[in-house]
Image: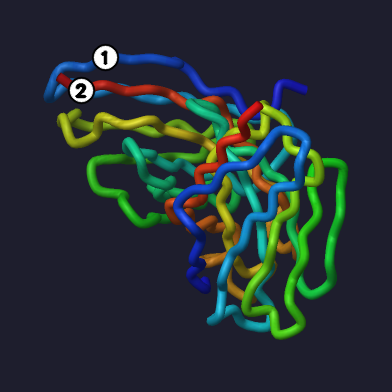
Amino acid sequence: NAGVTQTPKFQVLKTGQSMTLQCAQDMNHEYMSWYRQDPGMGLRLIHYSVGAGITDQGEVPNGYNVSRSTTEDFPLRLLSAAPSQTSVYFCASSYNVGKWNTEAFFGQGTRLTVV
Amino acid sequence: DAKTTQPPSMDCAEGRAANLPCNHSTISGNEYVYWYRQIHSQGPQYIIHGLKNNETNEMASLIITEDRKSSTLILPHATLRDTAVYYCIVRVGASMTTDSWGKLQFGAGTQVVVTP
């Protein structure tokens, strides 16, 4: 199993550009989420999904869109990149919704710089 | 979800046990205590979790006080590779609604440095 795969690993964008960060998992997990991590801080939840076709906002959703057309994929779209979105982005997935105690699996991150 | 309080940093000698405290005084009855760690520049890694009883796995032990208001993660024989930021998180295990399930609320964590 590959686990949670994020692409690209590094990206530099100009202000105003758009792009999509890819996240894929091969564990048949229903729950997937996106976090951002700024220097010296913990992770903050951007968006999450409890299954295909269902998404919801997290703590810091502004400037980002998500969709979940399949169980495996959960892309994160930056509509118009801003320097404030410079961060490291992590995708995570968990076992089926409704299980009492499940662990989350994280990807290795995408380091995004907006200039 | 209940918030947690952890010391910002701690040092540990290689080969010794590392005891990482976490305070979660507002934890409610259906909230689990989870520990994750993040080695520099990598994605967080699950370590262990528990509800009431002490737990042990191949990585660590988790000691939860009887009143559940605090816990301690124990790395029995710390190695240099255990240098990381350790996060203590409390979260609902399951819910009638899905809006809180699965969310992990990360604080600043404890920076653990293992020295030779």
> In the rendering, at what x and y percent does residue B59 appear?
80, 42
| The quarter of the displayed image where residue A5 is located | top right
Quarter of the image containing the C terminus of chain A? top left
**Left or right of B91 on screen, residue B4:** left
Specify whether residue A23 is in view: no
**Left or right of A93 on screen, residue A109:** left
Determine the residue positioned at 55% across, 25% down: A108
What subunit carries mark 1? Answer: A
> In the rendering, at what x and y percent does residue B46 appear?
68, 44
Q: In the figure, A6 relative to A59: above or below?
A: above
Residue A12 is labelled as 1
> In the rendering, at what x and y percent does residue A39 appear?
32, 36
Q: Amino acid at mark 2?
A: Val
Q: Amino acid at mark 1?
A: Val
What subunit carries mark 2? Answer: A
* Circle 2 residue: A114
Determine the residue positioned at 70% across, 85% down: B67
- Determine the secondary structure under disc 1: strand
Q: Is there a contact, CB below 8 Å, between mark 1 and mark 2?
A: yes
Q: In the figure, A13 relative to B13: above or below?
A: above
- In space, the residues marked 1 and 2 are separated at their CA atoms by 6 Å
Return the residue nearer the eye: B95 or A10.
Answer: A10
Disc with the residue nearer the chain's start (1 vs 2): 1
